[in-house]
Image (tube, rainbow, N blue to C red):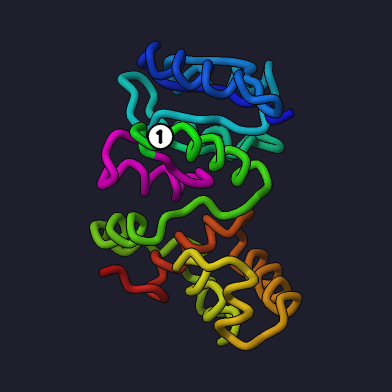
Amino acid sequence: MITINLVDDEPLIRAGLAALINAEPDMEVTGQAADGADVPDLVRRTRPDLVLMDVRMPGLDGIQATHTLQRTPHPPRVIVITTFDNDDHVWGALRAGAHGFLLKRTPPEEILAAVRLAHRGDTLLFPTALRALAATQPAHPTPAARAVATLTQREAQTLTLIAQGLTNAEIATHLHLGIQTVKTHVSNTLPKLGVRDRTQAVIAAYDSGLIRPG
């Protein structure tokens, strides 16, 4: 069972997502909130696997709420939800540790697929939208971005292909490598960058200039 918290200041959005999720045999909404300020306590009480969080709220926004969660032990994965695909708040939430993002107009079946994907630990990024967001951002030399320079050539190539949305199997075909070799490159890359998942590695790649948006 995938347990989920919903955080959105619009009751209608929360009600719709809750009805969608609770109709699935492998998912359950275990808590709801209307303000990012309520998220730490909600997560502490309900211990969800995943938080679906509005990126813009009149109180504490999704960026700060995500940042706060990442400083807690064993934080849940966060998917931020936005109305606009060019919302620069999304980039801030990804930098803060969000696992990915969805548009509020995303079809229901794709929302459910995204939840399952994130729960498995797979990358939940959309290359075209991410590239457009990155193009609007100034340089941001975070520790992870600076550490990109320590990657081997193969690790850097693998990271670039992850950012293009390729799976491990597709990367293996593209680079003419075995899939286990690709998995090794990925598992070596994350600790070098000091990040928890592929999403944060891709953000570091953009912030470092390894990947040029546009």
Does 78 sit left or right of 187 as displayed? left
Q: Is residue 207 left or right of residue 26?
A: left
Q: Quadrant of the C terminus?
A: bottom left
Residue 69 x %, y %: 57, 33
Decide whether residue 123 is among the magenta residues: no
Identified at 36% across, 32% down, the residue is: 104
Question: Looking at the image, which is closer to me, 151 or 135?
Answer: 135
What x and y, as percent, mark residue 85? 29, 45
Q: Quadrant of the N terminus?
A: top right
Confirm whether the magenta stretch covers residue 99. Answer: yes
- Which amino acid is tagged 1? Ile
Residue 106 sits in quarter = top left
Q: Which residues are magenta?
A: 81-102
Q: Observer-nearest residue: 75 or 114? A: 114
Q: Secondary structure at mark 1?
A: strand
**Image point (62%, 61%), residue name:** 194
